[in-house]
Amino acid sequence: MTRGNQRDKAREKNLKEQAGQKKKNTQSGTEFARTKEDQAAIMRAKQAKAEAAKAGGQVADQKKK
């Protein structure tokens, strides 16, 4: 049993690597779709806010000229 220690070390290393990997998606199809739509709504709101700020900045620049 000269290789027993190597086997144990390899097993420990493998378990450590598996713990660090991303786990499989556990959401159902409807849950995933709802989450995706919620995230898309948040991004649309951020984009609208950024566009409004950008448009407001352009108007302020035109007034200065």
Image (spheres, helix red, strand yellow):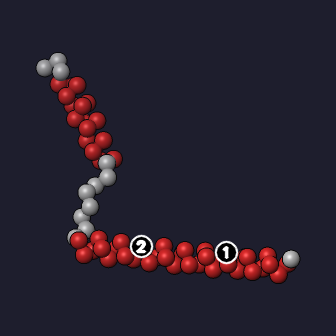
Taking depth in this image into account, of 45 and 17 the one nearest to the observer is 45
The residue beneath circle 1 is 54
Q: Position of residue 40 (x, y in %)?
A: 42, 74
Quick check: 57 above or below 25? Answer: below
Which quarter of the rendered picture does the C terminus lie within?
A: bottom right
CA gap, disc 2 and disc 1 = 23 Å
The residue beneath circle 2 is 39
* Label 1 environment density (alpha carbons within 10 Å; few <14, some 14–19, many ≥20): few
Quick check: 40 above or below 22? Answer: below
Quick check: 11 above or below 24? Answer: above
Q: On the picture, is 15 further left or further right than 49?
A: left
Q: On the picture, is 26 further left or further right than 64?
A: left
Q: Residue at x 67, y 78 (%)?
A: 55
Image quadrant where residue 57 sits: bottom right
Image quadrant where residue 2 sits: top left
* Label 2 environment density (alpha carbons within 10 Å; few <14, some 14–19, many ≥20): few
